[in-house]
Amino acid sequence: MTSKDLVSRFLDTLSIGPETRSDYARALRKFETFMSDKALSDEESAIKVLRTWLRQEVQKSPVSCVENRARVVVRYLEWRTNAGGGSHPVLELYAHYGRLIGPVVRALLEDDNGSALRRLIPLPVWGSVLGPAMQEHVARMKSLGYRYDTRASDLLRFDRFLQRHPALATVPLRQQFDAWRNESPGLRHQCLAQQCGATLSKALRRKASEVPTLPIEPGLYGRLTQQERRPYLFTEAEIRMLLDAARTFPSPKAPLRPVALHAMMTLAYCAGLRLGEIASLTVGDLNLARGLLEVRETKFFKSRRLALSPSALDVLRAYLEARAAFGAPITSGAPLWWSPLRRSGYCKGLIEWMLTEVIRRAGLKPAHGHRGPRVHDIRHTFVGHRMVQWYRAGINPQDRLPYLAAYLGHKDIRSTLAYLHVSPELLRQASERYRRHNARVLRLPGEAS
């Protein structure tokens, strides 16, 4: 089979438009032609040939466009490998220096590409002098039933820090964590380093009583909490702006994306789902006939079954119909959020980026930076609007808080109280309810109603 036929077969596996298909085909055939007479016997020769190709491409196009072409090339080579075509030296090169194509391309284009590539080599997991002890501690906590993903991620950061500073391997534990703390003056980093130090020192002390327990500075967590941004509560008009921005999200090469974003935003607001809960949904979790949504094994290992409003069900029904029209899998275990271009589900990071872009397009968040509303603030808004709606309907919210906690997936009401924020509308509704039911106790004897 010729390279032209292979490229055509590969492009048949992608759900792309004719213009994109033509661009991909041109790039892949040019790459195949360039590589056809090149001898790629080892990594050094592969780097030399790939640098030559990249330098030719970057003379004609911006670096960002060259990175996109490199991503298409890698996907094509992976497809050829999976189809039995054998491994390719270029593919092995990218795998050796990390799966992110952009950094590898930029490193190859540098004059001192050897040093740039070496900086990209992923560090081994738990490869530091304390790595085995940290790995054992994480495994022990998970065997006790804790999910422990966040703390394991924090300890991995410390593990990578120790690997980048091998001179710290022989100093006492306190000095190692002091060096990590000094890497950044931010309160968040200080708190993270001290929490990891206390956790690891206690774990080591179980085996060696001479290991001192590292303390956490009193009041540090409180100062960090005061520094955190307060949640942003969207108004009802702003929620409509978000839904409109999601529905009209510009995506000419992926027409299913705006429909998916509108459905995601609807679930975030109408069901108060966490970002991770939205990302992990499958087709089988949604039961349109009964109007129910299953949220499985989320925070605190809790699962819950949520009733959805008719309007939310209509949005999800429209999304499923559009999803099926693009040939997405309909098995119960298939990801609910499907990308026809990638022929796979969206990951959590990409969903967060897209929903953040929706907030920006609605004009509610600056064009750059981390300022302004976050995706998680929609969950806070769900709670705030629910409280206002109960007040408007004459319902005592105090009686409904246990139901709200269960709907949100909280382990108790105290967790839900963190989502109760005072807004002008909530104050007005609460004051009006007090006036109707309790203001009479403030009247003087004989005073008219």
Image (cartoon, helix red, strand yellow):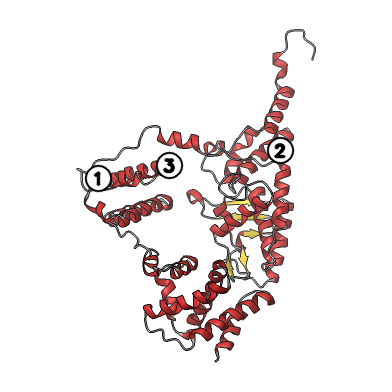
Q: Where residue 16 sits: x, y (%)?
A: 65, 74
Q: Nearer the viewer, residue 101 or 310?
A: 101
Q: Quadrant of the N terminus?
A: bottom right
Which amino acid type is shown beneath numbered disc 2?
Answer: Gln
Is residue 55 rendered to the left or right of residue 238? left
1 vs 2, front mark: 1
Q: Which residue is mark 1?
A: 205
Which circle's residue, 1 or 2, is located before the other in the chain?
A: 1
What kind of element bears circle 2?
helix
Residue 187 location (% of width, % of height): 43, 40
Q: Nearer the viewer, residue 306 or 374?
A: 374
**Whole-number angstrom distance, CA of label 1 to CA of label 3:** 28 Å
Q: Position of residue 242 (x, y in %)?
A: 69, 50
> Around disc 3, counting alpha carbons within 10 Å, would you say few (fewer than 14), some (14 to 19), or many (20 or more)?
few
Q: Residue 294 location, x and y as percent?
A: 60, 55
Image side of residue 37 versus residue 251, left or right = left
Single out the mark in the foreground, 1 or 3: 3
Is 300 positioned to the left or the right of 154 in the image?
right
Indicate which disc residue 186 carries. Answer: 3
Which residue is at the far right? 448
Q: Secondary structure at mark 1?
A: helix
**Along the viewing direction, whichever of 336 and 211 lies nearer the viewer:** 211
Between residue 132 and residue 146, name the one nearer to us. 132
Determine which residue is flagged by label 2.
Answer: 389
